[in-house]
Image (spheres, helix red, strand yellow):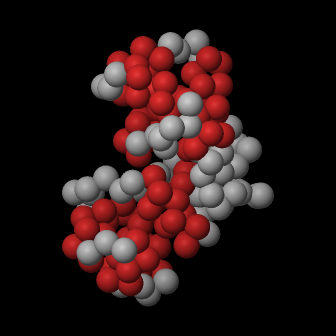
Amino acid sequence: MYSRLKELREQKEITQASLSELFEVHEYVYGQYEREYVIIPIKHLNTLANFYHVSIDYLFEFTDKQNYNKANKNIDPIKSGMRLKEFRKENKITQSKLADLLNTVQPVIANYEKGKHLIATPFLYTICSKYHVSADYLLGKSDKPKYLK
């Protein structure tokens, strides 16, 4: 993912300092995102996807397709939670089993599904890479594709 961040930034001839202003973080922090020293939060990942007009799946390097038709710019925590729950049930995964996979506890999954919090970036990445489900779909940014090949 992080190689895509750097590649997109360099294509647009934008500095890390400029992007750090967009996020209202120190330039050092943005540099840490690109070098994979710090995990980029979902809200910043979404801001980057919107800024570059690409999908989160593209940033995660799950697809080479840069964007999806009729993609939403915002992430709705309620819709995202409903989609996570739908995905989990469709794949016959309990909250406890998903929590074990993600090395967390069941109440964290329950809070995601209730829309109390957005899913953490490493959890989203793990689910999407293991089950080939679209991050943009789970986050409610797009309706298709649901699953990636």
**Residue 72, relative to residue 101: is it above or below?**
below
Looking at the image, which residue is at 52% across and 47% down?
Answer: 62
> In the rendered image, which quarter contains the C terminus?
top right
Q: Is residue 51 left or right of residue 140?
A: left
Looking at the image, which residue is at 45% across and 26% down?
Answer: 109
**Residue 48, relative to residue 21: is it above or below?**
above
> Which residue lies most toward the front here?
116
Q: Where residue 118 sits in the image (x, y, percent)? A: 49, 43
Q: Where residue 61 sits in the image (x, y, percent)? A: 48, 52
Q: In this rendering, does residue 101 appear at all? A: no
Q: Where residue 30 sits in the image (x, y, percent)? A: 30, 70
Q: Is residue 111 left or right of residue 64?
A: left
Looking at the image, which residue is at 41% across and 23% down?
Answer: 107
Q: Where residue 147 sits in the image (x, y, percent)? A: 64, 36
Q: Is residue 48 left or right of residue 87?
A: left
Q: In this rendering, does residue 83 appear at all? A: yes
> In the rendered image, which quarter contains the N terminus?
bottom left
> Which residue lies most toward the right here?
70
> Which residue lies most toward the bottom here?
13
Q: Nearer the viewer, residue 146 or 116?
A: 116
| Residue 73, quarter of the rendered image | bottom right
**Residue 56, relative to residue 12: is it above or below?**
above
